[in-house]
Amino acid sequence: MRLSFRVFGMVQGVGFRWFVKEAAAGCGVTGWVRNTLDGAVEGEAQGSVPALDAFVKSLKNGHPMARVDRAETQEMLDQEAAEKDFHIKPTV
């Protein structure tokens, strides 16, 4: 399963992308994350349904330096040649 996500709140300038990368590694999902110009964090993640459920729960909980106001997810088509890891992309 693959999903896109956007997280809103105080999620830039607090190490949130690194938190997301670590959460993805801990849950066993692949994909990417980046900051957006509107102050959100967005990305895509791919893995098993239980792994993605745990990952999304981590996104919604955030980490102590961040404040998550809301997290949105949307299912996508799996990528046949999915990433081998989870990485941080440049801001768009």
Image (cartoon, rainbow, N blue to C red):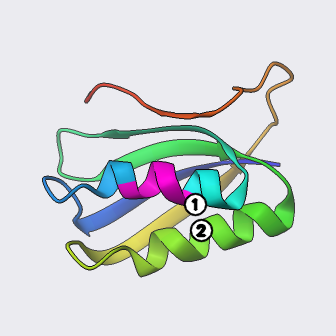
Q: Which of 76 and 52 is in front in this view?
A: 52
Res. 73 mark: 1
Going from the N terminus, do you reach mark 2 or mark 1 first? Answer: 2
Magenta span main SS: helix
Residue drawn at point x = 30 percent, y = 25 percent: 90
Q: Where residue 1 sits in the image (x, y, percent)? A: 83, 49
Q: Does the magenta stretch include residue 20?
A: yes
26 to the left or right of 33? right
SS of the residue at dot 1?
A: strand
* Residue linked to disc 2: 56
Closer to viewer: mark 2 or mark 1: 2
**Total tally of numbered discs in the picture:** 2
Three-letter amino acid code at disc 1?
Thr
Q: In which quarter of the image is the C terminus?
A: top left
Q: Mark 2 near mark 1, Cβ–Cβ under 8 Å?
A: yes
Three-letter amino acid code at disc 2?
Val
